[in-house]
Structures are given as C-alpha cells and as structure tokens.
Amino acid sequence: MLFEITDPDDTRLVLYRDVKDRDLTGRNGLFMAEGKVVLERLFTSPVAETVSVLTTPERLPGLAHLPDAPVYVVPQAVMDAVAGFPIHRGYLALGRYAPKQTLTQRVSGNRARVLVLCGISNTDNMGGLMRNAAAFGVDAVVLDETCCDPLYRKAIRVSVGGVLEVPHYRVDDVVGTLKALDLTPYALTPSGAMTLETVVPAARSAVLFGAEGPGLSADIMAACETVRIDMHGGFDSLNVATTSGIVLYYFSRL
Amino acid sequence: MLFEITDPDDTRLVLYRDVKDRDLTGRNGLFMAEGKVVLERLFTSPVAETVSVLTTPERLPGLAHLPDAPVYVVPQAVMDAVAGFPIHRGYLALGRYAPKQTLTQRVSGNRARVLVLCGISNTDNMGGLMRNAAAFGVDAVVLDETCCDPLYRKAIRVSVGGVLEVPHYRVDDVVGTLKALDLTPYALTPSGAMTLETVVPAARSAVLFGAEGPGLSADIMAACETVRIDMHGGFDSLNVATTSGIVLYYFSRL
C-alpha cells in the first residue's frame, strides 16, 4: 500500500519524528531500521514485523519487494525534516519485535548453539556480536539485564540486520537459565582453563562473553567451562565482537 | 625529563595544538597516541620512537615507566585548550614511526605470516585489522596505495596500540611484492574456491583482504589461492576486521 505524503506534519509520520531522540526512550517493542539492506532483512525477518516504511520517490524502485504494510513516499526534504537529520540512505522503516518462538522452543533440538552476552553496553559491539550470531547460525542470543538493547538503531545498522535474523531473549538469571535448558556453558576469558582449539563443543552448547575490560563475573565463570584464545607474546587484546567471530566460527564447524 | 608548563602558548606544545586538524594533514612520520594503554605500547614499540608526552599532574603517576623523552606536565585545562577538545583520558604522546627492519628483513625466516590490505579506507576497520595482526603474531602488514594511514589517531586507538607492535609497509605493486618475497598468497573472498578449514597454510604465507563491499580486484584474486568462510543460509555478511580475526587465528595455529 503506497501513500504519497508531502506534509511533514502528516500524523501518519508521527512515529518517524525525531528519530534520534526516540531511539533513547521507551519504544514498546518498536524499533527503527534504516538502509536498503536492513529493510529487506526486516521484510523477511523471522523475529519482527514491518509496521511501515518511509522512503522517497527516487528510492522506492530500489526495493525489490514491498511488505504488506503502509509505504509512505515523501520528498527527501520531508523525510529529513521529519526524522530530524539527513537520511542519506533514503530508507527508514518502523518494525515491531515479535519473535515467534520462546527461548525454550528455539533450543529444543539435539543440537543447539546459543550466544550469551553479559554487560555488553556498547552498541557497536552489540551490533558486531549480533552480526556474527547471524553469520554463524546461532539459534538464540541470551542477554543479561545489563546489556544494551540490540534494537537500538545503531546496533541494528552495525549488525547489517543480523539483529532481525536471530531472536534474542533477556533473562535475569543467566546461569539458572542455561542450567534449566541443559546447555553446556563455555565462558570466554583470558584466564580460561582450555585453549579454544582443544574444545570439543557439546551438541547443545552456549558460549558466554562479557564486556571488554571487566569480562564475566566470577559467579558466572564458576558455572562454566572456561576457554581462552592464546595470543602473541606481549599483546593480549581482542575486540569482543572479533572474539565472538572466532569462537562462533569454531563452534559452527563442530 | 619532566617539564611543568602552565602557558598554553608555550612553544614546546606546538605539535599538540589542534590535534584533530593536525591528524588530517601531512605529518612527516609523526603521529599522536592517546590513552594510557597506547602510550605504554608506544614507549616499548619496536616500530616507533617517543618524541614527547603530554599529561597532567594527576595522571603522571599512572604511567609505570617514563620514556627517554620530554614529558610535559600541564593542568587539564591547558591540555584541553592546546589539543582543542577535552582529553578525557589525560594522556597524549607524539611518536615518530621508524620501523627498524625492511619488509624483506621482516619475512626472511622459514615461517612468515603477512597480512595484506587493499582499499581499506575506514579507520575503524584499519584499527581492528591491526589489533588482530598484533594479537596473532603477524610479522608484517602490507598496504596498497589506497588504504588509509594506520597512524591516524583513531586507527591507533581502535587498534589498542597494535599499530605500534607490527610494522606496516606501503607498496605500489601488491602482487609483485608478494611474488618477490616468495610468499604464498591467500585471498579472502565470498567466492573463494576453498573453504577456510580446508586450507593448509604454506610456511611462508600472506592473507589478503579487500574493503567490505568492493572486495579484492580480479587481478589480485587471479594471482592468489582464493578462500571463503562459509556462513549460515541467508546471511553472508562479516565485518572485515572480524574476518581477519578468524583467518589470522586459524593461520597462527598451523
């Protein structure tokens, strides 16, 4: 359903207004997607629905398929005025996060690969972690209470839409949740007892990452197999998203 | 050698003036390091010398060792005024890039691991690539003419000082250089003939990465073994720095 709109004050555009500020306030499960690649992932997402799309007459033909939702077509100047800053990519969409399965359902098979994040507050790292989760076929992402929201606009963008491929679930008791699901937990830490290449992952396994710097808590590590990545002599510093890429790649092959 | 300075116009501070602008202009091999971790890497760097340090009286005791170079100690307000923006981390240093060995010398052994970058213009990616090169013991980084400078302030920061651990060399003929050095080249590309886990790296090998999006040129790929990383079904998207982490980890074990 296409709707041409020329008035920036049209009430149908109200949820696109001042996108930057809106990103920081309560969103009731709504989120903002931007750019062609991310929009196309949204349209086919298994974890989210498309509420509406905002684009320009010039950019509209760039979308191979349109969703079963309102598509508002506005001049670029109206788009910029409504959003509150220049939308160079020419595409915005409003989505609603609505995963179809519970965490338990997602990991009910004989094989499971779960990514568990604790204290990841940096949106770039969150986006990178979700991108890798999607690339390596993680079944579910579990977040502790202190992680930032993967549905922040920037995290979605950095994930190249990975946030819209893999469902995430926030839990208040990480260790208890993994135990209840009967997943074998592997905690990544520089002081790990095993080096990564000696790990033979359990069929149903979870890999845990903490924030760069503080890492995982002692309580969590005590409940896990601990795994390290050996590095070169004097330099023991890897980005957490990069580390997840190495570990998820490794776990996806076995 | 400690020097207390209170006048922001003191001529000894001239090279710290307007750090942001200076980063973009010709620097004659000079670069700016910031933050405690990066400064401490600079002081022991095998590829750079410390020209001088700028810090505050409060931060000075935080440095475990001082270099054999002038250390200017100034009030925070003077530091911010000179630099042109607030230096929250409280540490700046001026360095001079001066690797002690040529590329040929660096890779003269029976075993060599070289990272080759083509068209990497994003400073975040450059920093991430250099961080991984340092973490996994790469002997040298080769840059084509279109890569951004790893000595940009932000690239150094993102690399957590990795830029100051591994020497980099800019060359105008990537393929010819690798051939002359008798390194076996492996090009990473989604269309690679081999999947990573089937590669048995040559003792003297180079891994090549292009920019996200355009990737490596057909000419370069034709001169290389081509390698891919298989990803999950519909999602084939990895960040180039993350990809380098996976590949350099893999190559460092064999």
Image: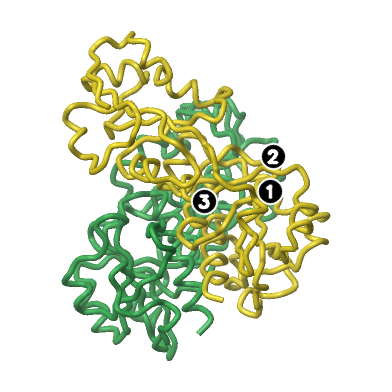
Chain colours: A green, B yellow
Name the quarter where the C terminus of chain B is drawn.
Answer: bottom right
| First of labels 2, 1 by sequence position | 1
Q: Is residue A201 left or right of residue B195?
A: left
| Residue at 55 percent of width and 27 percent of height | A78
Q: Amino acid at mark 1?
A: Cys
Quadrant in the picture for residue B45 = top left
With respect to residue A215, does A30 lie above or below? above
Q: Residue furthest bottom?
A: A110
State the image coordinates of residue B94 (x, y, percent, origin top left). 41, 29
Q: Are marks 3 and 2 on the same chain?
A: yes
With respect to residue A18, does A212 lie above or below? below
State the image coordinates of residue B60 (x, y, percent, origin top left). 21, 33
Q: Chain of mark 2?
A: B
Instruction: Give the label on residue B118, or none.
Output: 1
Instruction: Assess whether mark 1 and mark 2 are in contact (beta carbons under 8 angstroms).
Output: yes
| First of labels 3, 1 by sequence position | 1
Residue at mark 2 to residue at mark 1: CA–CA distance: 7 Å
Q: Is residue A124 left or right of residue B57?
A: right
Residue at mark 3 to residue at mark 1: CA–CA distance: 17 Å
Q: Amino acid at mark 2?
A: Thr
Which sits in the foreground, B91 or A34? B91
Residue at mark 3 to residue at mark 2: CA–CA distance: 20 Å
Instruction: Give the label on residue B58, or none.
Output: none
State the image coordinates of residue A173 (x, y, percent, origin top left). 19, 71
With respect to residue B176, does B74 lie above or below? above
| First of labels 3, 2 by sequence position | 2
Instruction: Assess whether mark 2 and mark 3 are in contact (beta carbons under 8 angstroms).
Output: no
Instruction: Give the label on residue B166, or none.
Output: 3
Task: Using a 10 Å C-alpha cutoff, classify the residue at mark 1 as few (fewer than 14 neighbours), some (14 to 19) or many (20 or more).
Answer: many
Q: Amino acid at mark 3?
A: Val
> Could you tell me which secondary element the residue under label 1 belongs to?
strand
Instruction: Assess whether mark 1 and mark 3 are in contact (beta carbons under 8 angstroms).
Output: no
